[in-house]
Amino acid sequence: MFGKKQETNPKLDELEDRLLVELLEYVIDSDEYSKIVNHLERIEEIRNPKRERSFSWDNVILVGGNLLVVLTIVAYEQKHVFTSKGLNFVRPLKT
């Protein structure tokens, strides 16, 4: 959800600016226009590489432990009187 800040690369910014200025000189249907657009797409891929979504096993274990605690408290509350709330024992996720 909250990723790292995108680092700016002055050389890529300069190259992208030059390509955009050069792009204005050509007609959309021309071969040069499509080549420049391909170069701009490559710059964007370099700037923002595709990353696979990954999850932390620490969070999976934490959620599983919290679920186990809540289920244990609910099972105990069905047979006995328990005055506190089960959610007080649940720890928040660490991000």
Image: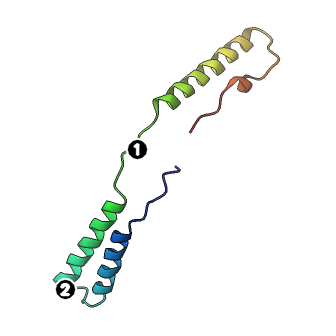
Given the image, on which type of amino acid does mark 2 rest? Answer: Ser
Q: Position of residue 4 (x, y in %)?
A: 48, 52
Q: Is residue 52 left or right of residue 3?
A: left
Please report contact status of discs 1 and 2: CB closer than 8 Å, yes or no: no
Given the image, on which type of amino acid does mark 1 rest? Answer: Arg
Q: Secondary structure at mark 1?
A: loop
Q: Quarter holding the C terminus? A: top right
Image quarter for residue 85? top right
Q: Secondary structure at mark 2?
A: loop
Near-viewer residue (15 or 39)? 15
Q: Position of residue 86 (x, y in %)?
A: 72, 22
Image quarter for residue 71? top right
Q: Looking at the image, which residue is at 50% across and 29% down?
A: 58
Near-viewer residue (50 or 64)? 50
Q: Is residue 87 left or right of residue 81?
A: left
- In the rendered structure, find residue 53 and report the number of the disc placed on it: 1
Instruction: Identify whether 74 is placed above or below 80.
Output: below
**Residue at the extreme right:** 83
Q: Is residue 83 left or right of residue 87?
A: right
Q: Is residue 57 left or right of residue 30?
A: right
Instruction: Identify whether 11 is placed above or below 50.
Output: below
Q: Few, some or many C-alpha atoms within 10 Å of disc 1 (few <14, some 14-19, many ≥20)? A: few
Picture colour scheme: rainbow
Instruction: Identify whether 47 is placed above or below 73.
Output: below
Residue for badge 2: 30
Q: Position of residue 73 (x, y in %)?
A: 69, 16
Q: CA distance from mark 1 to mark 2?
A: 38 Å
Q: Few, some or many C-alpha atoms within 10 Å of disc 2 (few <14, some 14-19, many ≥20)? A: few
Q: Position of residue 64 (x, y in %)?
A: 54, 24
Q: Looking at the image, which residue is at 38% across and 66% down?
A: 9
